[in-house]
């Protein structure tokens, strides 16, 4: 297959409103001998994209600063267009996804099996160009063969949301069959993934929190046993009713701000809260007495291991996980995709098709 000289891409050269996302013509990147050129068929929009665009993202400990001009896009789904001379595992035409956390394998954290915390890594869509483009290059070791059973649209929603939530719920939260789970921002990409993963893991009750009345029915359809509107209901009191006065075993919390202490009040003794985000605010007040009297576990989580990324891909390939897609838009409408996510009009993921 021939490779054109230029391609369409969406880039930002300054921070600001969605209008800073410019749909432009740029050269197709050139591959090194160990790299693969991927024709991107889908990428998805995340809250991190919004934060990056607004200039609010700070690099995690040990990682490089965030560059400008920049090309967003954490997830990459597509086909191999061309391969470098040293590439052995992929050939033109192969369907692939690019790992969203392509760990180095050699740093202190990778050596301890914590490769989600890899420090020798440039994250696609954070430290190096993401997939808001028709073509990206990736090292052979960063790609995974994609199951034929999944569309590019679904593949574009999978690794970032699902493997992150898998690590959050299963590895950090130790979710076990029969447990009761609380999911915040339930209609978002992580929230819909959390409901599916909790269901797959055998959770008893899955309580979903939303602020929109029109998202109640779709959340029930997805597998939430109870849906609470946190704007209108006394959430800790309702959780107590639902769980016979005990509270939930696990809260999967990705909002931050005042949502975090609210969820702590919903935990049973020895319950666990895992925090994965802060779009609702970076700081909050914690009731220390609640923390020790209830013997609570409050944990953070970040990213996913290589194994978890491969694992969620396999689970989706066999139909056990099925990403919920809210909108599919052409890449040229990236700014509109950001507006939809900012207005929280989506249910599930927003996909861009380059
Ligand atoms: Zn590493």
Image (tube, rainbow, N blue to C red):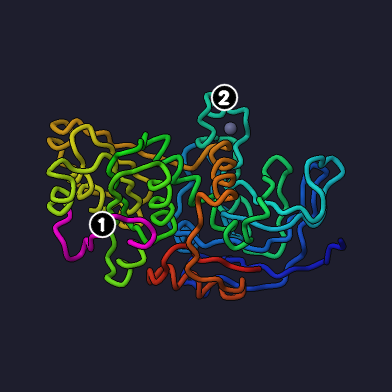
| Image quadrant containing the N terminus | bottom right
**Residue tagged 1:** 226
Nearer to the camera, 124 or 88: 88
Q: In this view, does 129 lie above or below 88?
A: below
Q: In which quarter of the image is residue 185?
A: bottom left
Secondary element at image label 1: strand
Residue at 82% across, 49% down: 91
Q: Where is residue 112 in the image (x, y as percent from the top left)?
A: 52, 24
- Between disc 1 and disc 2, whose residue precedes? 2
* Ligand 1 location (quadrant): top right
Q: Can residue 69 be seen in this view?
A: no
Q: Which residue is drawn at 58% across and 28% down?
A: 107
Left or right of 31 on screen, residue 146: left
Q: Give the range drawn in magenta.
A: 220-235
Image coords of residue 165 (percent x, y): 44, 46
Mark sitting on residue 111: 2
Which residue appears at 17% of the width and 65% of the height? Answer: 232
């Amino acid at each position: 297959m021939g490779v054109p000289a230029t391609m369409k891409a969406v880039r930002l050269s300054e921070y600001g409103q969605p209008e800073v996302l410019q749909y432009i013509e740029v050269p197709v990147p050139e591959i090194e001998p160990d790299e693969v050129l991927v024709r991107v068929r889908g990428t998805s929009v995340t809250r991190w994209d919004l934060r990056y665009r607004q200039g609010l993202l700070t690099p995690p400990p040990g990682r490089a600063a965030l560059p400008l001009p920049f090309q967003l896009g954490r997830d990459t789904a597509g086909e191999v267009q061309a391969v470098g001379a040293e590439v052995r595992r992929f050939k033109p035409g192969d369907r692939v996804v690019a790992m969203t956390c392509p760990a180095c394998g050699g740093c202190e954290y990778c050596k301890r099996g914590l490769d989600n915390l890899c420090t020798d890594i440039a994250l696609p869509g954070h430290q190096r160009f993401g997939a808001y483009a028709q073509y990206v290059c990736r090292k052979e070791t960063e790609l995974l063969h994609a199951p034929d059973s999944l569309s590019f649209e679904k593949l574009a929603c999978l690794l970032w949301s699902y493997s992150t939530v898998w690590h959050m719920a299963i590895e950090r939260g130790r979710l076990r069959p029969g447990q009761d789970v609380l999911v915040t921002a339930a209609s978002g990409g992580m929230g819909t993934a959390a409901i599916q993963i909790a269901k797959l893991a055998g959770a008893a009750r899955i309580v979903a929190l939303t602020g929109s009345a029109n998202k109640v029915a779709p959340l029930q359809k997805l597998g939430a046993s109870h849906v609470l509107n946190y704007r209108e209901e006394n959430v800790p009191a309702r959780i107590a009713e639902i769980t016979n006065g005990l509270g939930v075993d696990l809260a999967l919390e990705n909002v931050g701000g005042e949502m975090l202490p609210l969820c702590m009040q919903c935990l049973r003794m020895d319950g666990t809260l895992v925090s994965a985000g802060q779009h609702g605010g970076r700081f909050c007040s914690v009731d220390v007495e609640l923390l020790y009297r209830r013997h609570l576990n409050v944990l953070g989580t970040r990213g996913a291991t290589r194994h978890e990324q491969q694992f969620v891909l396999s689970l989706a390939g066999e139909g056990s996980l099925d990403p919920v897609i809210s909108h599919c838009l052409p890449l040229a409408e990236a700014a509109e995709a950001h507006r939809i996510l900012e207005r929280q009009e989506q249910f599930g993921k927003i996909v861009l098709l380059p």
